[in-house]
Image: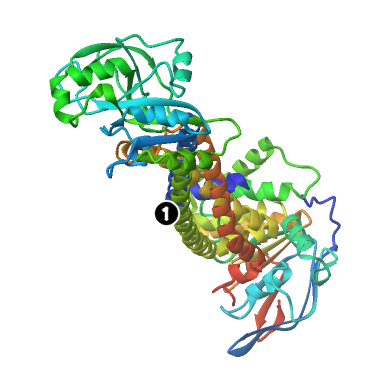
Amino acid sequence: MTAGPDAIKANHLLCELKNVVKTYKNGEIVRPLDGVSLRCEAGDFIFIKGPSGIGKSTLLYLVGGLLQADSGEILVDATNLKSISDYDLTILRATKIGFIFQETSLFQALTVGENLTFTLKIINQYTKNKLSKADINEKVAAYLEKLGIADRQDFLPHQLSVGQRRRLMVARALITEPRLVLADEPTNDLDDFWANKVIELLQPVSVRGGAVMMVAHNMLGAERGNRRYTLNHGALTPQH
Amino acid sequence: MWKFAWKNISRRKGQSFLTILITSLTVMVFVMIFAFYTNFQQGVILSQERLGADILILPNEASTDAYTALYTAKPNNIYMPAEILDAIKKVEGVALASPQLFIQTLNAGCCAVDSETRIVAFDMDTDFVLQPWLAEANLDSLADDQIIIGCNVPAYLGNRVGILGDVFRIAGTMSPTGTGMDETFFMNMDVAKRLAATNENLKEVLPDIDPQAVYSAILIKVQDGCNVADVVANIEKADLNVSIVATDKVVTNMKTQMSMIGQIMIGLWFLLLMVTVLALIGRFTALAQVRQKEMGILRAIGGQKSDVFKLILFEACLLAGIGELMGSILGIYAVAPLINWLQQGFTFSILALTPGLIAQSLLLGIGIAILLGGLAALYPAGKSARLDPQEVIMKGEIE
C-alpha cells in the first residue's frame, strides 16, 4: 500500500495520458478534453488551473478510472485502464490512488473516525501486510491530529463545519498513502490557514516518491507545483 | 460490511423505523393467522381423537344440534326414552353403547358454581369414553360425592365444588380436549338422576321428564372391522326416531369449513405479503437512490460491486430481521387474547397456545422476513451494484 521512497525511483512513470478525448452529449456536444497528453512521474506535483466547468474534474476522474475516455490511452503505474477488468480497476484505485473530491463525499452514518477506519479496512483486504486494529487506530488518530479534527473523532459528518468536512476528505485520501493523489479543488471552503496546511500535507506525497495532480480554479497552491498547466478549450497549456 | 450496514440502520432512525414498522405489521399478521389457524386445526383433530365414540345418538328434536352437543359447554337439556339404549345395543355392528344424561348447574350464590354449566352424567358400567380419564387419575370408579371436571372448570373450594346445593370432591381434572368437555362437570349417573328428581330449582328448568326413564345421548363404538356408515344405516333401519351423528362426519364437516376459512385467510395474507413486498421494494429503492453518491464513494475508495450489493442486502436483512422479531412477539401477544376470546364465544374447538406452536410461528416469521427482505432488496441492491461510480459521484459535479 505504502509507496515509500525506496520503492519508487525518480522518473518512474506513475501516470500517462496519450491523446485523450472526452465528450459529453447532453443536448449539445461538449468536449472538455480534446487530445490531451500528459506524463506524471514520481515526485511530480502537477498543478492545473482553469475556470469552473472547463473539464478539470473530468481529467482527474479519467486518471482515476472513474470515467472512460472516448479515445486515447490512460496508463496508471504502467497499467492501461482500458485493458483491465472492473474488479482489478477497483483494486488499482484502492491501492494506488487517493481521491479528494470537490463535493462532500463522506459516509453520513459513520463518525469522523469511522470514515477513516472504514477506508483503511477496505484497503486492508487487498494488501499482503495487513494493518492491525491498533495500527489503524494509531494512523487514524495521527491524521485527525494533523488536520485539526481530532476533537471531532466521534462526530457524524453533518455535525461538522464545511471546512472540517473538507479536511476529513483530505485525511481519507492521504491516510492510505497512495502513490498518486488526485485533488479536486482541495482548498475549497477552507480559510487561508487550513488551505495552506492542506497544500503542505500534499507536498510530502511527491517528496516520498509519489505524485500529486491538483486542479483548482485559482492560483492557491500553484507555487508548490513543479509543473503547472492551464486547461482551456479542451487542451492543456504549460505555464511557466 | 455488517457493521457498516448496522450503523447505517441505527443512525438513520427515522428511515429505519418506517421500514421496520412495515415488516413488523406483516409478520405480526402472519404469525396471528398461522398461530390461530394451526391452533384451530389441532383442536379439531384432538377433539376427534379424544371423543372416543364413533357414533352419537341424540334425541330427534328440532333443537338438537350435534355441533353444540360435541363442541360447546352450553347446557343442552335434551332427552329420549331410555328403552332406546336396549334397541341400539341390538343393532348389528354396535360393539359398545353407553348412555349419558345432561343436566346443568344453576346461577347460585357464594361458594358454588355461579353460572349455568353443563353436567354430563355417565354410566360407570358401560362407559368407554371417560374410563381412560379415570384411569389416568388412578380411579376405578367415581364415588357419589366425587366428580371429574373439564380442564377449564375452576374449583371453588380448594378441591371441592358446590353444585345444586351439594358439595362434591374433585376426583380429577381432564386434559384439554378442545371441546365442550373442557367446561363440563362429569358425575355418576345415579347422582345426576337423584339431583334431577329432587332439586326443585333444577326441576323448573328441565322439561317435564322422569329422570329415571330418559337419557340425553348414547355413545356408540362400532365393532372392529365394521364400517361406521353401515352401522349408521342399520340404526336408521331400526326406526328409533333419533338423530344419528357419525362423529367423524362432524369433524370432517368442520375441517371442510375450516379449510375454506383457512384458504380465505391465506389468500388475504398473501395479498398483504405482495403489497408489503412492493412497498419495501419502493422503500429500499428510494433509500438506495438517496444514497447513490455514497455507493459511488464506496466504489471509488476500493469497494467492489459485490460490496455495494452486500451492503444493501445486509441492511435489508437487518431491517427485516428486526421487523420479524418485533412482529413475531407482537403477533404472539396479540393472538393469545384473541384465542381466549374465541374460546368463550366460538362453537369450534380452540386450544391454548403451546410453546411448540409459538416456536413454530417464530420460525415461520423468520422465513417470511427473509423472504420479504430478500425479495425487496434484490432489485435495488443489484441496481446499485451496477451503477458506475463516476455517474453517481459526478452528478452535478462535472465541469
Q: Position of residue B308 (x, y in %)?
A: 64, 57
The residue singled out by tag 1 in the image is B18
In terms of image quadrants, where is residue B137? top left
Residue pictured at 41% horizontal, 53% vertical: B14
**Disc 1 element:** helix
Residue pictured at 55% horizontal, 57% vertical: A106
Q: Position of residue A49 (x, y in %)?
A: 63, 75
Query: With respect to residue B64, does A183 lie above or below?
Result: below
Residue pictured at 52% horizontal, 39% vertical: B228
Q: Position of residue B159 (x, y in %)?
A: 31, 11
Side of A105 where B236 appears, left or right: left
Residue B89 visible, this angle: yes
In terms of image quadrants, where is residue B59? top left
In terms of image quadrants, where is residue B82? top left
Q: In the image as oriented, which residue stretches furthest toward the bottom?
A: A28
Q: Residues within 10 Å of mark 1 (few under 14, many from 20)?
A: some
Query: With respect to residue B358, does A115 lie above or below?
Result: below
Query: Of the residues shown, which amino acid type is indicated by label 1?
Result: Leu
Residue situated in front as seen by the camera: B368 or B263: B263
Residue situated in front as seen by the camera: B345 or B397: B345
Residue pictured at 68% horizontal, 70% vertical: A60
Q: Position of residue B300 (x, y in %)?
A: 66, 61
Side of A200 where B129 appears, left or right: left
Task: Specify the quadrant that holds the C terminus of chain A.
Answer: bottom right
Q: How many marks?
A: 1
Chain of the residue on which disc 1 is drawn: B
Residue situated in front as seen by the camera: A79 or A234: A79
Residue situated in front as seen by the camera: A137 or B381: B381
